[in-house]
Every structure is written in structure tokens, then in C-alpha cells.
Amino acid sequence: MSKKDVLSSETNALAAVAGPFRAFSEKLMGEEGLLWLQAFKRFLRKENPWPTEVVPKSFPVWKTITVGGKSKKELLAELEAKRFNVGDWAKDMMAQKAFTTAFSLWEVDLVTVTVLDLGFPKGATTQEIWSKAKDLSLNLCPAEVGPHLRLAYADQPQGEYLWVAIKQITDSDSTPRVFKVGRDGGERWLHGDGARPEGEWDPDRLIVFVLPCK
């Protein structure tokens, strides 16, 4: 092959990749640039660039807990007897008709994901998060998972905060809320946090969902 042919071949190769490179640069500069960069790094490691599309591998079971078997009054009494800090809004939520408990005991498999894990590098609304989780076969938790998780997670690390994804319970002040399980300042607590459908969630918020029953 002559020098001219080599140069022509190299020019054609560069022209072939110019378009994809330009498109990739535009993706990096767009709203989902962080997601594309992370996907590219996984591609270089010969991994699946978009693992969140495969739920069993992306979202392994984080914790299995037993729920049911207690009335709402019994749940609250046990939380207080074990010296968990139950916030006023959490108590308000548990007093609403929408908060129900199962008569029989049953196990649920929980997963934890961040808003970023769900594909929202700049955050998203409650409605967007719930919708994307459904697309990924992640279900909203039964409401009683919040208090039961607080009871079962006594060894929660300091400074960790978990939002429990449920069908929002409207409190006595007409605010839709979800349970928030956290530990800080030496206290382990259960609070009720506002979660309006249009409310924004930061990308690093850690959310608890439940896997479908097998």
C-alpha cells in the first residue's frame, strides 16, 4: 500500500468516527452527561454500560424484613417502648385511614436505590421517580414497611437517611408524605417527609422500594 493509500485510509477512518464522537460530546454536555460518562467508563471496562435496565443484577435484595401481625397502635407502642424517636408527622401518618397493617405475618424483600441510580443525574419529581421505578419492576412499599423497617434496622449507620417509597399518605394538614428512617445525633428515628407529586428529590437521596413477590 502506497503512502497515499495509507493517508486516504486514515482519513476515511477519522471521518467514520467523527460523527459518533461529536454525538458523544453532545451527550456529555447535556442534562444526562454524568450518566453517559459513567456508562462510557463501564464500556471501557467491558461491562454492561446500562446495568440499571437489568433489575435483578442492578438492584439486589438489601434487606428482608417481616411485616404484618401488629395493629397500628401496637406498632407505635413498640416503637416508643424501644425508644425510637417517632416524629409528629410520622404519628399523624400512622393515624390516617390510609395507613393499614396486615393481619398475617409476611416477608418483603427491600432494595435501596438513589435517584441517580434510577437515571436522574439532576434529580426528579416524586411522580417521575415512582413511574421510573415501576418501569424497572420496583414496587412501592406497603405503608407499614416504614415503621417495621425502623424496628428491624436498629443497627442503622450514623448519618444514614432512607426515604420509604409508598403511596403517599395525606396528613391532617393535607400534605402527601412518605416515611423517612434515619439516625443522627445518637438517635434512631422515624419521621414523615413531604412528597408531593411535583416535589423535587435530589440525585443522592436513598430510597427504599420492594421487589415483586416471587
Image: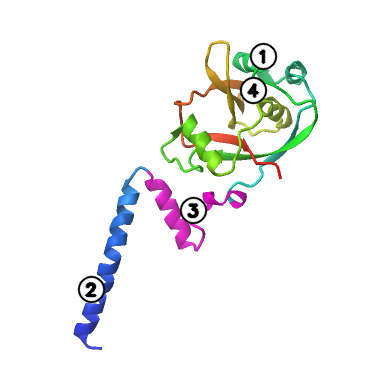
**Viewer-side residue, 62 vs 69:** 69
Q: Residues within 10 Å of mark 1 (few under 14, many from 20)?
A: some
Residue underneath mark 2? 11
Q: Magenta: predominant secondary structure element?
A: helix
Pair 1/4: label in front: 1
> Which of marks 3 and 4 precedes in the sequence?
3
Q: Position of residue 141 (x, y in %)?
A: 64, 32
* Amino acid type, callout 1: Ala
Residue at screen point 53% across, 13% down = 174
**Residue 16's image quarter?**
bottom left
Residue extending furthest left?
4
Q: Residues within 10 Å of mark 3 (few under 14, many from 20)?
A: some
Q: Is residue 175 magenta?
A: no
> Seen in the image, is 69 located left or right of residue 166?
right
**Viewer-side residue, 23 vs 83:** 23
Gap between marks 4 and 3, in whole Å? 34 Å
Residues in magenta? 32-57
> Which of marks 4 and 1 precedes in the sequence?
1
Gap between marks 4 and 2, in whole Å? 63 Å
Q: Secondary structure at mark 2?
A: helix
Pair 1/2: label in front: 1
How many callouts does the rendering have?
4
Residue underneath mark 1? 95
Residue underneath mark 3? 50
Q: Secondary structure at mark 4?
A: strand
Q: Secondary structure at mark 1?
A: helix
Q: Position of residue 24 (x, y in %)?
A: 33, 55
> Seen in the image, is 136 located left or right of residue 122?
right
Residue underneath mark 4? 190
> Which of marks 2 and 1 precedes in the sequence?
2
* Amino acid type, callout 4: Leu
